Image (cartoon, grey):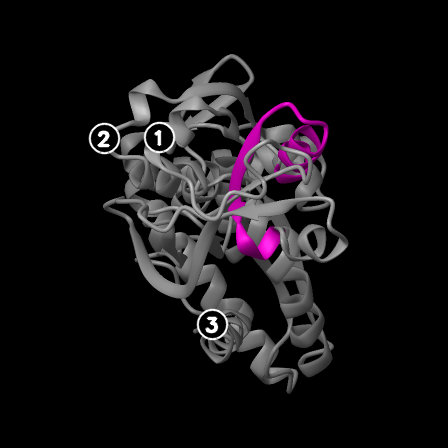
Amino acid sequence: MRYTLRQLEVFIATAQHENISRAASDLAMSQSAASGSLRELEQQFNVQLFDRLGKRLRLSELGRQLRPAAEELLDRARALEQGMLGEEVSGRLQLGATLTIGNYLAVPMIAAFRTRFPAADVALSVANTAAIAEKVAHYELDIGLVEGELSHADLSCEPWQADELTVFAAPGHPLARRRALTDDDLLSLEWIVREPGSGTRQPFDRAMHGILPALRLALELQHTEAIKRAVEAGLGVGCLSRISLVEAFARGSLVPLRVPHRDFTRRLHIVLHRQKFHTAALREWLALCHEQAW
C-alpha cells in the first residue's frame, strides 16, 4: 500500500478546513508535518488533490471524487480499531440539527444515547436546514435532523417525525379570543417569521399559498426564542413549531390562534450522505431516532 491512514487523515482534515494550519491543529500535528504528509501523498501518485488559493486549499476535481472513498476507509479503520479494543459503540458522532430540533428534541436524545453508550460522544451543531444539509454533503456532519424539505443529489432525506406549526400571539392581542381566523384576518396581521431557507419558513410559505405575497412580514428572524419574545412584546404574531411553544402556552405568556382552513402540518427529516459509511455509533443513533419516530 503506497499511502498511510495518517496521510488520509491529513487529506480529509484539510478538505474540511480548507487550511493546512487548522487541519494540523485538528490532528494535533505541527503544520510542517501536516504539509509534508499531504505533499508526499500527492507526489506518490503524481496527482493534485487541492487547488491552492493563497493559504486556502480547495479540493480539486480529483480530490472531490476521492474524498468519499477516503472518508469511508477512515471510518472503517476506526470501526476495526474499536472492535479490536472490544468497544462496540465509541468515538464521536457529529450531529447536526435545526433550531427547533436542537433546542427541544436533540438534547434528551443525546442524554439517552450517552446513557446507553458511555464510551460514545455526540457533538451537536445547530443551524438552519440549508446549512445542515451543506455540512452533511461536505462530510462535516455524520447526520442531520432537519425541519425542512430538501433535494440534493448526494443526500438521502428520510421522513422522521410528524410536526405542526402553530400561529400564536400575545394574550392581549385583539384577535386572541377569536374562535378562528379568516384569510382577511391573516392579511391584516403583522407577521414575525423565520428567515428564508429555514425549515420553519418552508411550511409557513406553503400554508399561506395564495395570499403569501400580500402578507405583511414585519420581521424575519433567525432564532425561535427571538420570535417568541417579539410576539410577547406585541410586535406582531408568529408561526412556529408547536414543540417550541408548549411551555409558553402553559405559562399563558403566548396563546394559539386557530387557522383551521390552512394546513400547517409538516415532517421532520433525517439527512445522510448517500456514500457515508455507517459506523456503530451512527447505526445506534439511527435506531434511537426510529424508536422516537411518530
Residue 84 showing in the rendered view: yes
Label 1 vs label 2: CA separation? 52 Å
Amino acid type at mark 3: Leu
Q: Earlier in the sequence, mark 1 or mark 2?
A: 1
Amino acid type at mark 1: Gln
Task: Provide the secondary structure element on which disc 1 rests.
Answer: loop
Residue 1 showing in the rendered view: no
| Residue at the extreme top of the image, as rendered | 54
Residue 230 placement (x, y as % from top left): 67, 28
Query: Which of the two residues, 264 or 151, is positioned nearer the viewer here?
Result: 264
Point out the frontmost of discs 1 and 2.
2
Label 3 vs label 2: CA separation? 38 Å
Task: Identify the residue shown where x is 42% and y is 28%.
Answer: 196
User: Which residue carries the number 3 mark?
Assistant: 286
Point out the frontmost of discs 3 and 2.
2
Residue 234 placement (x, y as % from top left): 67, 26
Q: Is residue 102 magenta?
A: no
Q: Earlier in the sequence, mark 3 or mark 2?
A: 2
Label 1 vs label 3: CA separation? 36 Å
Task: Provide the secondary structure element on which disc 2 rests.
Answer: loop
Amino acid type at mark 2: Gly
Residue 11 placement (x, y as % from top left): 48, 42
What's the mark number on residue 210? Answer: 2
Task: Identify the residue shown where x is 38% and y is 45%.
Answer: 137
Point out the frontmost of discs 1 and 3.
3
Query: Which of the two residues, 69 or 235, is positioned nearer the viewer here?
Result: 235
Q: Which residues are magenta?
A: 224-244
Q: Is residue 284 left or right of residue 183?
A: right
Q: Is residue 105 left or right of residue 119?
A: left
Dividing the picture into quarters, in which one does residue 188 lie? Answer: top left
Q: Is 278 situated above or below 63?
A: below
